[in-house]
Image (tube, rainbow, N blue to C red):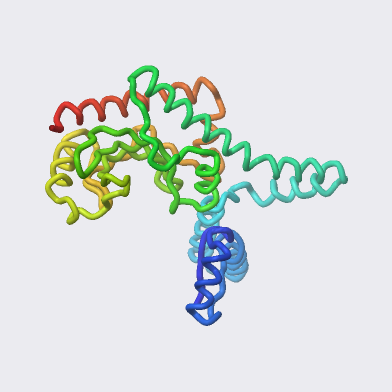
Amino acid sequence: MILLTLFDHELSEKDEKELGEKLEGNFIHITYREQIRDWIAECIKETAQKPLLREALVMYKNLVLKLTGQSYSEGMVREMKDLIIKSRGNLENALHIAEALPEARIEIQKKFWTELEYILKKEFGLETKNLEGRVSNSAIKDYDMYGSSKEIGLPYLLKDKEGYNVVFWVTGNKSYGIAFSFSLYDDSNKLISDKKIMPEIWVQVSSIANQLEGYFEHAVCPANKWALENLKFTFEENNDEFKLVDDSTRENIIKEMAKEVYKDINSFKKAFK
């Protein structure tokens, strides 16, 4: 059996051990970032006399490079490599940059979430409900490492009823971007992700939220929608993190998103009894 993922770090040592035990060691782990990329490159070499197939493979390779954050041209990569190995000093500087880059990316994302939370509190009086602390440095780091299976975000308690809570989430997903959702939690702060557990309340929340612009019922929550400014924090070239480095651009994005969040929360509160 072959386990195929985008990156090599998507499988923890524990997961790999458990998977190896279940399959009695009969599996290998390969990635799009390395093995599939190299395999496509070899295939392209064999298709010189088949232009349509070659063009399809070139497009496929470009997609893989984009998804795995390798969209720089091969010529540019070679130039950077030659520059790095030109001297010991260059190599040392490159290592320092590589070490600092993950922390820099965490800081960029942290600024976004911290400033969004601040504006929502200062301008609209919205206080977050601490369910899981999903915008801590460790949460952002996990999100960066494990991709779309991890989410980060800000929770806002809308209704605290006996037996359940209605919480509005601003969440960030690496693959799909910023989403807003109306979710149900029980008294122990456990997400109610099955409509059958509390069908009447689920339907009530869903029917009200889905009257707001852009919302739809989701498999694990009564209502969900993608934000108008649907940021994606990815490894791609020219990604949304580049926008957020600039203070004025980040401020404008956050202000517009905060208005959208407040509008949806306020409309829901007026309708929900």
**Is there any visible trace of residue 198 in the rendered image?**
yes
Left or right of 187, for residue 236? right
Q: Nearer the viewer, residue 148 or 204?
A: 204
Image coordinates of residue 44 in percent, x first then y, are 58, 65
Residue for point 34% across, 33% down: 228
Q: Pick out the residue farthest to the top.
A: 123
**What is the quadrant of the C terminus in the image?**
top left
User: Who's the residue at 51% across and 72% down the image?
Assistant: 18
Answer above or below: position of 181 versus 62.
above
Q: Nearer the viewer, residue 146 or 6?
A: 146
* Placement of 52 over or under 22, stated as above or below: above
Is residue 36 among what the camera can see? no
The residue at the point 62 percent across, 36 percent down is 104
Q: Relative to residue 74, is residue 212 depicted above or below?
A: above
Direction from residue 132 to residue 5 in the image, left or right: right
Give the total number of marks visible in the rendering.
Answer: 0
Residue 257, compared with residue 38, is above or below; it is above
Residue 103 appears left or right of 191: right
- Residue 4: % across, % down: 51, 67
In this image, 16 relative to 122: left or right? Answer: right
Q: Position of residue 42 (x, y in %)?
A: 62, 68
* Figure quadrant of residue 156: top left
Q: Nearer the viewer, residue 208 or 55?
A: 208
Camera-side residue of 74 and 169: 169
Residue at the location (20% across, 29% down)? 269
- The spot of residue 95 in percent (x, y) is 76, 45
